Image: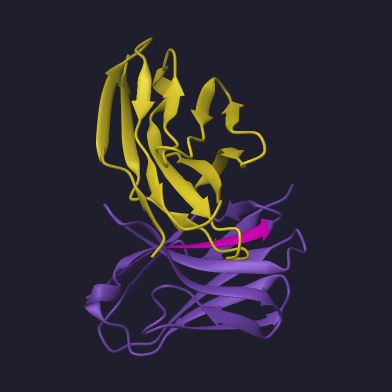
Chain colours: A purple, B yellow
């Protein structure tokens, strides 16, 4: 069954702590993405990865970094989380024009 | 810059009502357009897509027509059901933007039984 997985599904952190969000896909897709979703703003692209160690900034990369050391795995890292990074984060991978999304991680930064 | 606008943040209908969700886009090129649907607790999933070659897409009773003149890509369904309750996102991929999608703000559809 083709799928994108995300861990953890829910996370509560304090301001200034480091955050690691993990994403995996079993479809061998080259391209993967990290988005954040906020009410009224839709999905905003944070980073896009075209393959292992080939990452590019999206529209809102500030405060985030990513790591992709294996094709099937893409991590989003928040060094010293801020309260305005409270959001739902989605990972996706793509084949052709279609993007396949994971179930999301709800991050709360207190 | 490129943008996708969904003016309706929320739409509430009764079962068997007609659905119309606005989407307009702004770009200099000839984009591919998409509608994604997000059910509660899940990630978005592709509902339909349209290119300049075919102009119209349909899936699961939903239809959308690509109108280059008005730069619009509205989503329609003749008779909605309660199971259609979800958030609908219009999205655009510019022809020179590689894999990147630009999403609208989303429209939350609630269908009352």
Instruction: Left or right? Give the position of B7 relative to B83.
Output: left
What x and y, as percent, mark residue A28? Answer: 77, 64
Q: Extreme top residue here?
A: B16
Q: Nearer the viewer, residue B43 or A33?
A: A33
Q: Nearer the viewer, residue B37 or B39?
A: B37
Find residue B95 and report its image quarter.
bottom right
What x and y, as percent, mark residue A80? Answer: 33, 89
Instruction: Left or right? Give the position of A91 relative to B26.
Output: right
What x and y, as percent, mark residue A27? Answer: 75, 58
Instruction: Left or right? Give the position of B110 relative to B40.
Output: left
Q: In the image, what residue occupies the spot 73% across and 68% down? A: A30
Query: Does the magenta run of residues contain B99?
Result: no
Q: Is residue B59 visible?
A: yes
What x and y, as percent, mark residue B97? Answer: 57, 65
Query: Does the magenta run of residues contain A93?
Result: yes
Q: Nearer the viewer, residue B100 or B9?
A: B100
Identify whether A15 is placed above or below B57. Answer: below
Point out the image quarter for the N terminus of chain B: bottom left
Query: Mostly what secondary structure, the magenta segment?
Result: strand
Q: Is residue B43 visible?
A: no
Identify whether A1 is placed above or below A6. Answer: above
Query: What residue range appears in magenta?
Result: A89-94
Find residue A19 and report its image quarter.
bottom left
Q: In the image, what residue occupies the spot 37% across and 83% down? A: A62
Q: In the image, what residue occupies the spot 44% across and 56% down? A: B27
Number of marks present in the image shown = 0
Point out the image quarter for the C terminus of chain B: top left
Q: Extreme front residue here?
A: B69
């Amino acid at each position: 069954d083709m799928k994108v997985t995300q861990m953890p599904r829910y996370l509560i952190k304090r301001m200034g702590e480091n955050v690691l969000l993990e994403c995996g896909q079993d479809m061998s897709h080259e391209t993967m993405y990290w988005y954040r979703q906020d009410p009224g703003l839709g999905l905003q692209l944070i980073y896009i990865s075209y393959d292992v160690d080939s990452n590019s900034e999206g529209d809102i990369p500030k405060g985030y970094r990513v790591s992709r050391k294996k094709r099937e795995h893409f991590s989003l890292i928040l060094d010293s989380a801020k309260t305005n990074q409270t959001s739902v984060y989605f990972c996706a991978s793509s084949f052709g024009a279609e993007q396949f999304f994971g179930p999301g991680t709800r991050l709360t930064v207190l | 810059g490129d943008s996708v606008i969904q003016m309706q943040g929320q739409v509430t209908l009764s079962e068997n009502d007609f659905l119309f969700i606005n989407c307009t886009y702004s770009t200099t090129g000839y984009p591919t357009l998409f509608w994604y649907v997000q059910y509660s607790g899940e990630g978005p999933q592709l509902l339909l897509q349209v290119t300049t070659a075919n102009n119209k897409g349909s899936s699961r009773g939903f239809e959308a027509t690509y109108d280059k003149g008005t730069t619009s890509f509205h989503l329609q369904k003749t008779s909605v059901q309660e199971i259609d309750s979800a958030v609908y996102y219009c999205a655009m991929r510019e022809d020179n933007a590689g894999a990147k999608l630009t999403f609208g703000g989303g429209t939350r559809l609630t269908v009352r039984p």
